[in-house]
Image (cartoon, rainbow, N blue to C red):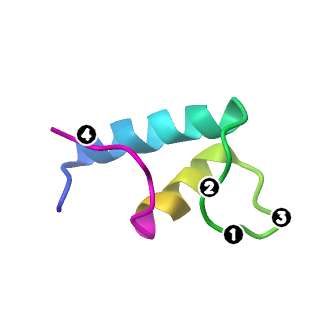
Amino acid sequence: MKHTKFEKARIIGARSLQISMGAPVIIDVPKIMIDPVDIAILEYDNNVIPITIK
């Protein structure tokens, strides 16, 4: 499903907040990648974020 830029921003923002608060990361990320926003974008690009849009 194609998301609008606003939905994408909301999904990535919510997921990066979860990651920064200690939620487990779903995919393998390189050790040098520590920014929660970058990790959330990587998860979004791989379609593994467990957030649903209605």
Query: Residue under circle 3?
Result: 32
Other-residue count near label 1 (Cα within 10 Å), few / some / many at <14 / 14–19 / ≥20: few
* Element carrying mark 2: helix
Q: Residue at x 51, y 60 (%)?
A: 43
Q: How far apart are marks 4 and 2 (CA)?
A: 19 Å
Looking at the rendering, the stretch of residues picked out in magenta corresponds to 45-54
At label 2, counting other C-alpha atoms closer than 10 Å, the crowd grade (few under 14, some 14-19, many 20 or more) is many
Residue closest to the far right: 31
Residues under numbered marks 4 and 2 in contact, where contact means CB atoms less than 8 Å apart: no
- Determine contact: label 1, label 2, CB under 8 Å: no
- Name the residue: 43% across, 67% down: 45
Kindly report the distance in space between the C-alpha atoms of the residues bearing marks 4 and 3.
Answer: 28 Å
Q: Which amino acid does label 3 sit on?
A: Ile
Amino acid on which disc 4 is placed: Phe
> If the image is split into quadrants, where does the N terminus sit?
bottom left
| Residue carrying label 4 | 6
Label 3 SS: loop
Residue carrying label 1: 28
